[in-house]
Amino acid sequence: MAPRSSSASNRHADERQGDERNAGDRYAGFRVTPWVHHLGRFVDRHRDLWIKLGEGETRLRADDIADTAIDKPIFVSGLARSGTTILLEVLAKHPTVACHRYKDYPFLFTPFLWNRFLGFVPERQNIAVERSHADGIAVSPDSPEAFEEVLWMAFFKDLHDPAVCNVLDGETSNPDFEGFYADHIRKLLRVRGRARYLAKANYNVTRLEYLLKVFPEARFVLPLRAPVGQIASLAKQHRLFCEGERRHPRALDHMRRIGHFEFGLDRRPVNVGDGAMPAVLAAWEKGDEVEGWARYWASLHGFLADRLAANPALAAAVKVVRFEDLCSKPFEVLREVCDHCRLPNSAHLVAEAAELMRMPSYYRPDFTEKQLLQIDRYTADVARRFGYADAVGV
């Protein structure tokens, strides 16, 4: 999705410009600065130490967070390229909301300490630059970003092993994580001076019931996209990330450390335990990207449809947002999202964001007739469960 040009955000500029750049500029966004690389590696290699430091910080600041309640946390989760980032950016503009930002990395475990340090660093002009996805979204150190996966990976093993089921459900119990996570949210709220926590975490699609058990008042926003458009975008991003990581190997290490496995040289699909994963991986192994993505789309969204149908409490907590609806009637959809998230006084925010949205124009799916039939074969039944007429869309 791309908004019309805006001096306020400079986001979602026409991505044709990205395709016209020379190769050197095209992959510049994959460069990882030495300090981010080395400090990120240090934190990643010593997770247990940073958990202890985070716990120590919590004890030291116990009085500061004693009265900080976790009120209806908001989680934006979905398969990549479905609108998760734009929804995060819209919701993050609400004055009551706090979320992770680019500048929080790599010291996420100690938000009080790290933000205190940042307070002593001379402020520089934060110039937004296009992110590595080459999708027209410009980001700065203050932009909202998905980073909480770093915390999940520190407490749960095999979260990103496609050979095993990655689902965390209502029966899951990890008291150490649950206490640390709740304290972390309280500290972030206190640091930001806000009342509501917001997280974009795509992998939470397989943890919705676990999160609902931990936070019974949680609100979930689940964007999804018709298979043809989403598979085209996923395949495009995968090619981009593979080449970017080849040219800048530190980018691959960085993606692994922050838990970003959606595409790139270390692509790891989410295993929902339905037996589909061997066929997904086999398709990609033989070079059939379309079949692999189609099977994966159907597996993940079929799992979500099943859980929403089986769990009324979860269904009530989840707002499904179809990408196509978000682009074609953004005012209505964003108003519904804010209402679902219990975010009052959102009219100005919704109007401003809705004015900027439109369908992407920088690329078009170029599948062959055979590939379109292939996508429809694997995805159409699941797509209809979310109101799509077929794999193409509404």
Image: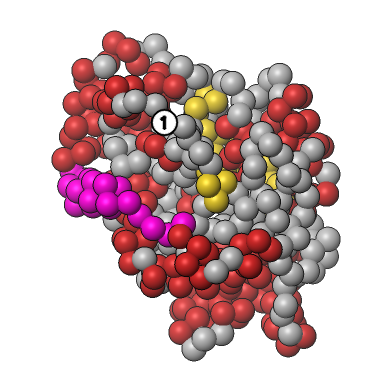
Q: Please tell me which residue lies in front, 5 or 197.
A: 5
**Residue type highlighted by circle 1:** Arg
**Residue 120's x, y, as percent?**
29, 22
Report the residue at 60% width, 49% height from top: 137
- Left/right of residue 106 with respect to residue 165 in the rendered view: left
The answer to whether residue 68 is seen in the rendering is yes
Where disc 1 sits, the SS reads loop
**Residue 9's x, y, as percent?**
64, 38
Report the residue at 18% width, 34% height from top: 52
**Residue 218's x, y, as percent?**
54, 32
- Quarter of the view holding residue 119: top left
Report the residue at 24% width, 31% height from top: 54
Count how many numbered circles sit on residues in the image: 1
- Left/right of residue 44 with respect to residue 260 in the rendered view: left
Residue 156 is a magenta residue: no
The residues colored magenta run 29-48
**Residue 373's x, y, as percent?**
75, 82
Report the residue at 46% width, 32% height from top: 125
Residue 123 in the image: above or below residue 17: above
Residue pointed to by mark 1: 124
Question: Colour scheme used in the picture?
Answer: secondary structure
